[in-house]
């Protein structure tokens, strides 16, 4: 074979330049030209035009995943989410075949399915990934979360148990296990899992037990949450946020006097944040339909910070809830006046 015969000839394309003359572009030059146009359209928000250029790029370079990803984002940003998902799934199928999982398309699909609350498809792609990469602990975590979102806590428990078996010194994994066990109403084992997390990382014990309390709240177990916050306070009596959280739980259970007294303790520990704490208390009371008490609380917050327009708006909502439309409108006008005069 001659040297000349062994050379690869560049693919040539004709285009019309600004002078109206026919010029020749190589395949690479045409790719660069379309890519620049696609990126310019994306920056300018002309997503429909970007779609056209990315399609041309894919025709020219059928094996180049980056252009398929670009097309996916053009579809996504133009509001055509289903078409974007189709593109990401094509890249995802290729990712599953690689020795090392890159996961770019997988991450985008996870994000989209979470946003759209399409948890069945979220579970499906997570199961696919684990089938391809069973030893990746972080991917197991994605699967466990998917099971929880899909209302399958028992399956999540099984996943998190695998994670704690593989990494018995990972406190975060025991927290995940505990959260899933709460969702299955296996409260004794849940508390044991959180205790294990605290034993592994004592410096984070307060954060772990706070997560347990919030997991109880998610499960509708207010009494258990109250008990957990009280246990936290036995060793952390100077933490205002614990009093705030406990106060919220007490009010949610209808224990208004105790809840408001608990808030007073938080304010005593951090007087500079009194206005903020009063606002939170007012919102907690309002959510529990105690609007008379909420109104008095918002008024106290306003007395401390009369230029905070948000306090007026929350106050107006409670007036409305009580059918006091005139007072609500007057309060909204006060908030608008404060905004205008800033």
Image (cartoon, rainbow, N blue to C red):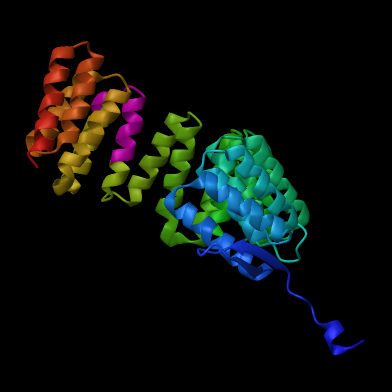
Residue 197, how many percent across, how many down?
53, 55
Q: Quadrant of the C terminus?
A: top left
The boundaries of the magenta stretch are 244-257
Q: Image quadrant for the N terminus?
A: bottom right
Give the residue at x 17% y 33%.
Answer: 311
> Which residue is located at x 85 percent, y 83 percent?
6
Residue 137 visible in the picture: no
**Residue 215 in view:** yes
Residue 245 among magenta residues: yes
Looking at the picture, how far across and down is residue 306, in whole percent?
8, 36
What is the tally of numbered marks visible in this picture? 0
Position of 45 with respect to 71 (left or right) is left
Q: Nearer the viewer, residue 341 or 56?
A: 56
Point out the residue furthest to the right here: 1
Asked if the magenta segment contains residue 254, the reply would be yes
Q: Residue furthest front?
A: 20
- Residue 155 occupies which quadrant of the picture? top right
Q: Quadrant of residue 315?
A: top left
| Image spot of residue 113 (x, y percent) | 59, 40
**Location of residue 211 with respect to 301 vertically, above or below:** below
């Amino acid at each position: 074979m001659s040297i000349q015969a062994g050379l690869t000839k560049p693919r040539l394309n004709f285009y019309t330049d600004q002078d109206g003359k026919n010029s020749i572009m190589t395949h690479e030059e045409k790719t660069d030209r379309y890519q620049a146009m696609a990126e310019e359209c994306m920056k300018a928000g002309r997503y429909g035009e970007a779609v056209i250029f990315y399609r041309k790029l894919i025709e020219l370079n059928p094996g180049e995943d980056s252009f398929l990803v670009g097309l996916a984002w053009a579809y996504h940003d133009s509001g055509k989410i289903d078409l974007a998902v189709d593109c990401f799934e094509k890249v995802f199928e290729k990712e599953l075949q690689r020795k090392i999982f890159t996961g770019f398309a997988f991450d985008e699909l996870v994000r989209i399915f979470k946003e759209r609350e399409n948890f069945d498809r979220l579970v499906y792609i997570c199961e696919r990934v684990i089938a391809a990469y069973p030893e990746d602990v972080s991917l197991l975590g994605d699967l466990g979360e998917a099971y929880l979102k899909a209302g399958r806590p028992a399956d999540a428990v099984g996943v998190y148990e695998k994670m704690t078996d593989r990494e018995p010194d990972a406190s975060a994994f025991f927290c995940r296990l505990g959260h899933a066990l709460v969702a299955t109403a296996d409260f004794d084992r849940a508390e044991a899992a959180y205790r294990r997390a605290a034993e592994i990382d004592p410096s984070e014990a307060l954060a772990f037990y706070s997560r347990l309390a919030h997991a109880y709240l998610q499960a509708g177990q207010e009494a258990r949450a109250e008990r957990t916050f009280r246990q936290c306070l036995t060793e952390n009596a100077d933490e205002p946020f614990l009093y705030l959280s406990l106060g919220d739980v007490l009010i949610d259970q209808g224990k208004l006097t105790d809840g408001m007294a608990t808030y007073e303790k938080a304010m005593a520990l951090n007087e500079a944040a009194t206005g903020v704490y009063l606002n939170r208390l007012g919102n907690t009371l309002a959510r529990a339909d105690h609007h008379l008490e909420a109104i008095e609380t918002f008024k106290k917050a306003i007395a401390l910070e009369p230029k905070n327009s948000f306090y007026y708006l929350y106050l107006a909502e409670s007036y409305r809830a009580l059918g006091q439309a005139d007072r609500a409108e007057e309060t909204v006008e006060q908030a608008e006046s404060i905004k205008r005069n800033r």
